[in-house]
Amino acid sequence: MPVTIKPIAAVCVPSEIRIPLHQAAVRRLKTGGVFVLEALLAYNTGGPQSLDMLMSLDEFKRELAGLEFIHAVQMEREVREESRHAGLASVVQVLARKA
């Protein structure tokens, strides 16, 4: 089932910040709560140049351990977030629930 996600914020952070942030999000999510996220696998449309700030689906699944993944895909899609971030990008989309 395809899911279209419109982000309300875009944040690129190194793994030393991202991993604890994801772990805290899982801990603080109430049972039955839903986690929605779209992140970049590779970004040739003006995003971060550091590989540490780019994600893969396997990394997300490890960092979000404890959630049940309803939708978890790697795909390419057109990105039009602003004039500097436009074009074909590889993304990870995650829709998960805390059981």
Image (cartoon, rainbow, N blue to C red):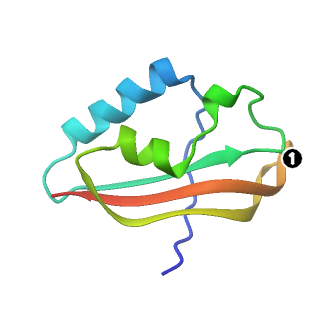
Which residue is at 48% across, 81% downward? 1
Q: Nearer the viewer, residue 56 or 83?
A: 56
Which residue is at 45% across, 58% downward? 94
Q: Is residue 44 left or right of residue 34?
A: right
Q: Residue furthest top?
A: 16
Which residue is at 33% across, 59% downward? 96
Place of residue 45 in the rendered image (x, y in percent of width and height, measured from the top left): 84, 46
Q: Quadrant of residue 87?
A: bottom right
Q: Nearer the viewer, residue 40 or 83?
A: 40
Which residue in the protein does label 1 denote? 83
Place of residue 84 in the rendered image (x, y in percent of width and height, measured from the top left): 86, 42
Which residue is at 30% across, 32% downward? 23
Q: Is residue 56 left or right of residue 42?
A: left
Looking at the rendered structure, the kind of residue marked 1 is Ser
Q: Nearer the viewer, residue 74 or 9?
A: 74
Q: Residue furthest bottom?
A: 1
Q: Is residue 71 left or right of residue 25?
A: right
62 in relation to 70, above or below = above
73 in relation to 14, above or below = below
Place of residue 71 in the rendered image (x, y in percent of width and height, measured from the top left): 42, 68
Q: How many tags in the picture?
A: 1
Q: Residues within 10 Å of mark 1 (few under 14, many from 20)?
A: few
Place of residue 32 in the rendered image (x, y in percent of width and height, measured from the top left): 16, 60
* Quadrant for the C terminus in the image: bottom left
Q: Is residue 56 left or right of residue 43?
A: left
Q: Secondary structure at mark 1?
A: loop
50 in relation to 33, above or below = above
